[in-house]
Image (cartoon, rainbow, N blue to C red):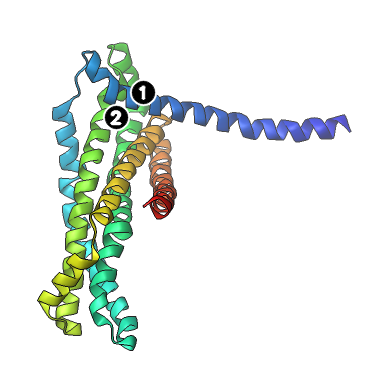
């Protein structure tokens, strides 16, 4: 009987201890990242703005074509699906409401986050993981350079700026896609569609989406950095951690989106 009990609690312990270590490592990276981003500049350690601009170009500017293309198609699909339902009740003008509000509040932030997660979040994990495998991270520490300040903070600043900007671009392009479909295939007057969109959208709708995008940028960066620093092997481990960073980022983006949607539903 004691052996069964020992085996049971031993199994629990073997499962909990790695989880405890992962939580400790994650909390340490989060703490270091926020310290070097928001506190150290007031203590004489300036941010690396040139490196941040370089990351903005790679994570933001280079993502414009894919974000714009997908947003255009999503806007067209939304308008088409809305028209399919609304024409039954003679309310085609409300296609503009559905497209505008759906994109600004939900679809643009989350689609942009998923695209950036697959494109840039994986790149963050691969870059840091490759440096970890090649012992370049240890070399930075030996030279007295904090790896989080040197590698993670510029990426965090880049996504905190560029993800809301890409989300705004997605809003505009997606609404334009709905406009194209509505004014050509459905036959709505362009001025009526434009006016209906303005009447449907509120400042809080746009602000909600941008706030979500800001949170998504933080999540994607931290997950990519965490998975990169966890690399403890060669190329195979780098690939495994890169894949894990994309999956984890998308999962956490959905969770954060649910949290903010619930928060805004009850308090706005």
The structure residue drawn at horizontal position 18% and vertical position 39%, both measured from the top left corner, is: 56
Distance from the alpha carbon under mark 2 to that under mark 1? 10 Å
Closer-to-camera residue (55/133): 55
> Taking the image as drawn, is residue 134 in sight?
no
In the rendered image, which quarter contains the N terminus? top right
Quadrant of the image occupied by residue 76: bottom left
* Sequence-wise first label, 2 or 1: 1
Q: Vertically, is 190 above or below 203?
A: below
The mark total stands at 2
Instruction: Give the residue number, with chain letter if any, for mark 2.
Output: 152
Left or right of 200 in this view: 33: right
Q: Mark 1 Cα within 10 Å, few/some/many (few <14, many 20+)? A: some
Q: Nearer the viewer, residue 177 or 224?
A: 177
Say if mark 2 contacts mark 1, CB within 8 Å: yes
Can you tell which of label 2 and label 1 is closer to the viewer?
1
Q: Is mark 1 on a helix, strand or loop?
A: helix
238 or 258, which lies in front?
258
Give the labeled residue for mark 1: 32
> 97 above or below 160?
below
| Residue 252 image position (x, y, % from top left) | 43, 46
């Amino acid at each position: 009987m004691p052996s069964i009990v020992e085996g049971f609690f031993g199994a629990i312990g073997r499962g909990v201890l790695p989880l405890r270590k992962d939580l400790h490592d994650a909390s340490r990276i989060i703490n270091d990242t926020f310290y070097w981003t928001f506190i150290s500049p007031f203590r004489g350690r300036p941010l690396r703005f040139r490196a941040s601009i370089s990351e903005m170009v790679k994570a933001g500017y280079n993502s414009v074509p894919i974000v714009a293309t997908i947003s255009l198609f999503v806007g067209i699909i939304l308008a088409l699906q809305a028209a399919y339902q609304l024409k039954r009740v003679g309310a085609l003008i409300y296609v503009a409401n559905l497209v505008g509000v759906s994109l600004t509040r939900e679809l643009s932030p989350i689609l942009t986050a998923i695209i950036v997660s697959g494109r840039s979040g994986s790149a963050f994990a691969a870059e840091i993981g490759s440096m970890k495998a090649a012992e370049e991270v240890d070399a930075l520490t030996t030279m007295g350079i904090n790896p989080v300040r040197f590698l993670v903070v510029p990426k965090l600043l880049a996504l905190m700026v560029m993800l809301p900007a890409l989300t705004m671009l997605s809003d505009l392009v997606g609404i334009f896609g709905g406009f194209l479909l509505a004014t050509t295939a459905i036959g709505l007057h362009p001025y009526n569609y434009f006016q209906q969109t303005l009447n449907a959208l509120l400042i809080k709708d746009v602000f909600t989406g941008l706030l979500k995008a800001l949170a998504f940028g933080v999540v994607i960066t931290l997950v990519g950095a965490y998975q990169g620093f966890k690399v403890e092997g060669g190329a195979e481990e780098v690939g495994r951690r890169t894949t894990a960073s994309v999956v984890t980022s998308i999962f956490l983006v959905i969770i954060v989106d649910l949290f903010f949607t619930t928060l805004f539903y009850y308090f706005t």
